[in-house]
Image (spheres, rainbow, N blue to C red):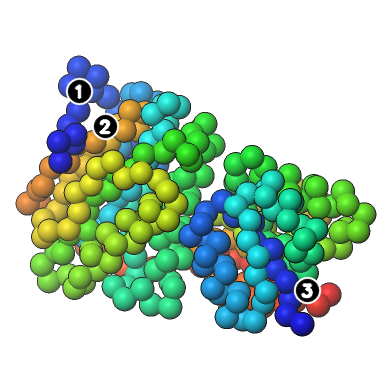
């Protein structure tokens, strides 16, 4: 994609790694978010007007959307990212998305990458968050750098080994009655 | 008569998930996209249970809870918070505002339905 590149004169200096199951948000112009993706998908969201952005990194539990578990966990991964951005002053109506990953890695977990891509696309479509750029699927790992305050992304296909993704670990929230 | 549920959440994905899950359990489900819309349809829906998110535009979940409890006819209306937030200070604030329960996303269908039935019957 044409806009997966940085303006080198404004290169941020400190990087934060976003590992599977985690998310990061920032309004600090000196921060770049990084991750390494195989089957997992990273959603990058930015409100350029507020100078706030962030990234999540998730892998849904199964490739067949078993009993709504995928949707519940995936929407949770998206919502915690969005809520983190709103707390830093972003508006949902101004968010722009870039999504990456979802590769089919040799010998691992079948076509789960495709299910992750489909979920991310559907979620953004349902929530009316414009998808401005993406690089999804294929059979190669991706290294991603994302500047949260501007929404600039840089993605490279890499040959290096990606840590084995952990699937089927979707959390379930507590219920407290007072 | 089925229990009437008003579910308030700014995520369309969550609203649709709740609608499917709760309708399958036999509830009459109504949804609203934020706190203002939720309060606007409160009289028309006259729900047995309100489920509300916390982080929403225009009016957040705490605003919804306060407005409902300020109405003398709704001091006992069961309200469940359904949120990604799990911080104890928020939970305590909600409890002091008169919330009936707190459910952390991602929610489990069976536990959510059981919680709704329990608070609606007390």
Residue in the image at 69% along x and 63% along y: B6
Name the chain under label 3: B
Residue in the image at 34% along x and 61% along y: A119
- Give the residue pinned by disc 2: A152
Q: Which mark is residue A7?
A: 1
Name the chain under label 1: A
Q: Position of residue A10 (x, y in %)?
A: 24, 19
Residue in the image at 10% along x and 47% along y: A157
Query: What secondary structure is found at the residue carrying circle 2?
Result: strand
Query: What secondary structure is found at the residue carrying circle 3?
Result: helix
Marks 2 and 3: CB-CB under 8 Å? no
Q: Quadrant of the N terminus of chain A?
A: top left
**In this figure, what is the number of numbered marks?**
3
Looking at this view, is A118 or A35 the one in front?
A: A118
- Give the residue pinned by disc 3: B120
- In the picture shown, does residue B9 fall above or below A147? below
Marks 1 and 2: CB-CB under 8 Å? yes
Q: Position of residue A146 (x, y in %)?
A: 27, 36
């Amino acid at each position: 994609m044409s806009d997966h590149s940085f303006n080198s004169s404004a290169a941020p200096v400190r990087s934060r790694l976003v590992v599977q199951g985690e998310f990061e948000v920032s309004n600090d112009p000196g921060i770049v978010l990084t991750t390494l993706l195989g089957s997992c998908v990273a959603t990058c969201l930015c409100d350029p007007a507020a100078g706030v952005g962030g990234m999540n990194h998730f892998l849904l539990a199964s490739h067949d959307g078993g009993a709504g578990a995928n949707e519940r966990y995936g929407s949770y991964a998206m919502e915690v990212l969005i809520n983190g951005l709103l707390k830093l002053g972003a508006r949902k109506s101004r968010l722009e998305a870039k999504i990456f990953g979802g590769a089919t890695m040799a010998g691992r977990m079948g076509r789960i990458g495709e299910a992750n891509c489909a979920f991310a696309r559907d979620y953004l479509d349902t929530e009316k968050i414009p998808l401005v750029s993406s690089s999804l699927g294929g059979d190669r790992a991706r290294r991603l750098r994302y500047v949260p305050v501007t929404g600039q992304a840089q993605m490279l296909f890499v040959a290096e080994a990606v840590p084995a993704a952990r699937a089927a670990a979707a959390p379930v929230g507590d219920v407290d009655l007072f | 008569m089925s229990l009437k549920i008003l579910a308030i959440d700014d995520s369309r994905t969550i609203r649709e998930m709740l609608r499917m899950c709760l309708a399958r359990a036999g509830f009459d489900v109504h949804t609203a996209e934020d706190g203002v819309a939720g309060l606007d349809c409160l009289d028309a829906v006259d729900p047995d249970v309100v489920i509300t998110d916390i982080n929403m535009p225009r009016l957040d979940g705490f605003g919804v809870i306060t407005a409902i409890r300020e109405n003398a006819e709704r001091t006992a209306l069961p309200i469940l918070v359904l949120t990604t937030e799990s911080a104890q200070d928020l939970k305590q604030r909600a409890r002091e505002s008169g919330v009936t329960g707190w459910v952390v996303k991602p929610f489990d269908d069976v536990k959510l339905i059981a919680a709704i039935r329990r608070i609606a019957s007390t």
